Structure formats: structure tokens, C-alpha cells
Amino acid sequence: MTTNTTLFKSLIDRYNAVAYTHNYIWGFIFKGNVYMTITTANMMPFVCKLDRASRGAGYALRFCPTSEQKIALMPTAKVICSEKYFNEVYAKSKYNKGEIFEQIVTEYFGQVWTKDSIPFTEDGDITVNGIAYQIKFQKATFCNEKSIANLEK
């Protein structure tokens, strides 16, 4: 294994060791639509990448699916809205795209969304049928080396 491969696997394993849930709702834009798909943490190595973190925090684990990876997610993906609608909601909002996706997913499941700051170590972003999920939209950061090291102390 190369050093980056080892670091990538280490960040995934360390994140999962402290995460409250290992269930995910992934979101991405593809060919004019916003999709969501539900998977487990087993999908992380296939749709995440190792990237430089900001502000000297080492490397970061990010959900940045390529077109090929988006196509691989399609068998379980559903259109949740159009890209046009998503961008209109985003343009009128004070929230970032990940938060807008979280709001749309929450409303899709018939729940009321409110912005919160509950750590990923304590709960998911949404609970559906008794199952907690983390919601991640394309370009989302899971963690970086510095944040994981702080959680492990």
C-alpha cells in the first residue's frame, strides 16, 4: 500500500470508530438532477477521496464522487429534485449546499428541518424508521487528520 492509500484507509477507519451511525444518505448532481442514495459506510472507500485539509489540518476525507462513481451509485439512487430547483433554493438561502440538501432530504421524508450542530459522534442528521443517517452532499468533508486526532484524545 502506498502512504496515501494507508492514510485514506486509516481516516475512514478512525472516522467510523467514533461515528454515531454508519448509514449514509449521499447526494450529488448528475445531468440536471439532484440524486440521493442510501448506503452504509462500506461505500466510503468507493466514493470518497483523500484531499488536503485547510489551515494546516493535514489531509481530509471528502465525498467527491466522479461521474463514474455517480453512475455506479445510480442503481440505488432517486431523483430528489432538479438541479435548477436546488440552485434556486440555495440562491435564496443563507445555508450552504450541504445544508440545503439536508433540508430537502428531511422534507422528502416528511420531517421538519432545522439547522443544528449535533456532532456526528452523538447522532445522525436524520432518523427514518428508527435508523439514524448522516447526510452528505457532493464535496462534503467528513473529517481531517487534526479533528480525528482531537476526538481520539
Image (tube, rainbow, N blue to C red):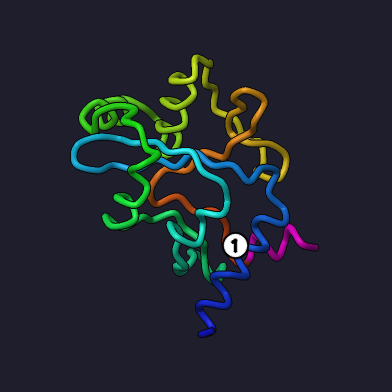
Task: Report the quarter where the C terminus lies.
Answer: bottom right
Magenta span: helix, strand or loop, mainly?
Answer: helix
Q: Is 73 or 119 nearer to us in this picture? A: 73
Within-10-Å neighbours for mark 1: few <14, some 14–19, many 20+? many
Query: Going 59% across and 62% down the picture, which residue do you hit?
Result: 12
- Identity of the residue furthest to the bottom in this view: 2
Q: Which residue is mark 1?
A: 12
| Residue at image point 38% right, 56% down | 64
The location of residue 82, given as percent across then percent down, is: 24, 29
What residue is at 58 percent from the left and 69 percent from the top?
9
Residue 48 image offset from top left, x and y in percent: 45, 59
On the image, the x and y values in percent for residue 93 come to 36, 27
Name the residue nearer the viewer: 117 or 15.
15
The residue lying at 59 percent from left, 36 percent from top is 133
Q: Is 66 on the left or on the right of 46, as rendered?
A: left
Disc 1 residue type (three-letter): Ile
Q: Vertically, is 148 above or below 115?
A: below
On whether residue 148 falls in the magenta region, the answer is: yes
Q: How many numbered marks are there?
A: 1
Place residue 77 in its image quadrant: top left
Between 71 and 125, the residue placed more toward the observer is 71
Residue 33 is inside the magenta segment? no
The region drawn magenta spans 146-153
